[in-house]
Image (tube, rainbow, N blue to C red):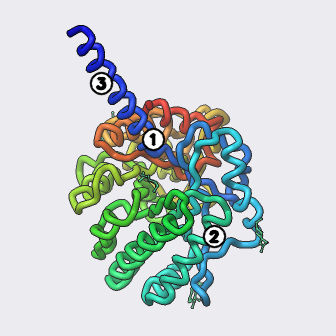
Amino acid sequence: MAFITAKILLLFSVLSLLQFNLCIGQNVKGGYWFPESGFAASDIDSNLFTHLFCAFANLDPQTYQLTISSTNNASFAQFTKTVQLKNPSVKTLLSIGGGSANKTVFASMAAQSTSRKAFIDSSIKLARYYGFLGLDLDWEYPQAASDMVNLGSLLKEWRTAVAAEATTSGKVALNLTAAVYLAPTLNDLKYPVQSINSNLDWINVMAYDFYDPSWYKFTNSHAALYDPSGQVSGSYGVGAWSQAGVNAKKLVLGLPFYGYAWRLVNANNHGLLAPANGPASADNGAMGYRQIKNFIAQNKAAIVYNSTIVTNYCYAGTTWIGYDDSQSINDKVLYAKQKGLLGYFAWHVGVDNNWALSQQAKQSWGA
Ligand SMILES: *[C@@H]1O[C@H](CO)[C@@H](O)[C@H](O)[C@H]1NC(C)=O
Ligand SMILES: *[C@@H]1O[C@H](CO)[C@@H](O)[C@H](O)[C@H]1NC(C)=O
Ligand SMILES: *[C@@H]1O[C@H](CO)[C@@H](O)[C@H](O)[C@H]1NC(C)=O
Ligand SMILES: *[C@@H]1O[C@H](CO)[C@@H](O)[C@H](O)[C@H]1NC(C)=O
């Protein structure tokens, strides 16, 4: 009797150990790196991440093959080796496109099966040649209903090709992901949700850039988690994607490691939704977290945390900055975990401040 009990107990502990291992293998603590940030890949503390995205490869406008600029070639070729020095199990993905890539070229590539094939074959070849463990599509953004349909075909053919390549090469299949808009409907166009859910390993939901000082004349968080009065929030986006049919386990929540600086109309009116008249710094007011922390220290800025919408902001004189500090990152990561999402990703690792936000995110998620 006691023997059987011991055996059953042993079985249970082996099972729970297995389950535990599966669980810790199954989340994404991600971050994007891009060389134009001026931050060296060798300086990334890769222990704080499970996945690192190397951004961006681009499409050749004639052949539709994937290319890496000659400026970035050497650092991309070394990226996986470089970041695996500190953490041999960190996974790397080659990210394609980005906000400044030419969307017309993506649309034409996706429109024909021959150009889709040229893209797909070259992407797999390049990923293998450079030692990446996955590919990440950042098409920002499809602009017509036909683009969305073609995107659906592209993802299906890409998945088929990646699976076939794994069989032929005997290697583990490349992961396929995409960075997508906050919600599955973008300017009345619907993402191909079914194809996304069945062909991608996960999507990175870009839950930021809701407002910026160049066009929005009030102070605000550009990445609030909650919006009590509307549909402009990370939780709205996550809910909309999962309602549309993407499994929560395929959703990865975006965390911005940057904020926006507004110029206040009146230095004494410095709350949320205070009147503002444009950016308070270069680059449309966009500021990396490290830069914001320096601003706070130099100007003895006041810091506020608003847990209703989940944002930090700070102000000094007529400068007002909405951004994510440790408290917002903590609340967002706890939200992602509680909703059963696959994980989170940061845009971008080069602007963290001594790894404070990356560490906070990792710690808040836990194992
Ligand atoms: C890019 O880097 C790879 C790997 O180091 C090398 O084989 C290739 O020749 C380089 N291409 C260019 C255009 O520099
Ligand atoms: C984008 O690509 C299209 C097609 O190749 C080209 O006609 C257009 O000039 C490009 N736009 C920019 C801004 O480079
Ligand atoms: C990434 O790809 C591997 C190999 O195909 C797969 O086992 C794993 O589940 C994928 N990751 C996710 C999070 O889907
Ligand atoms: C937090 O923000 C919300 C939404 O703007 C606002 O209604 C609330 O008063 C703020 N809370 C605090 C403590 O400032």
Residue 137's spot in the image, x, y percent?
Answer: 49, 67
Q: What element does badge 2 sit on?
A: helix
Q: Is residue 134 above or below residue 339?
A: below
Amino acid on which disc 1 is placed: Gly
Task: Answer few, some or many: residues within 10 Å of disc 2's Cα (few below 14, many 20 plus, some between 14 and 19).
Answer: many
Nearest the viewer among 237 and 293 is 237
* Mark nearer the N terminus (3 vs 1): 3
Q: CA distance from mark 3 to mark 1?
A: 20 Å
- Which residue is at a point 64% across and 33% down the rendered structure image? 297
- Element type at mark 3: helix
Asked whether disc 2 touches disc 1, contact meaning CB atoms under 8 Å apart, the reply is: no
Name the foreground residue: 255 vs 307. 255
Quadrant of ligand 4 in image: top left
Label 2 or label 1, whichever comes before in sequence order: 1
- Residue 167, image x, y percentages: 49, 66
Q: Is mark 1 within 8 Å of ligand 3?
A: no
Residue reaching furthest top?
A: 2
Q: Which residue is mark 1?
A: 25
Q: Which residue is mark 2?
A: 126
Is ligand 3 closer than 8 angstroms to the Cβ of mark 3? Answer: no
Rounded to the nearest angstrom, the CA distance separating label 3 from label 2 is: 44 Å
Q: Is residue 124 visible?
A: yes
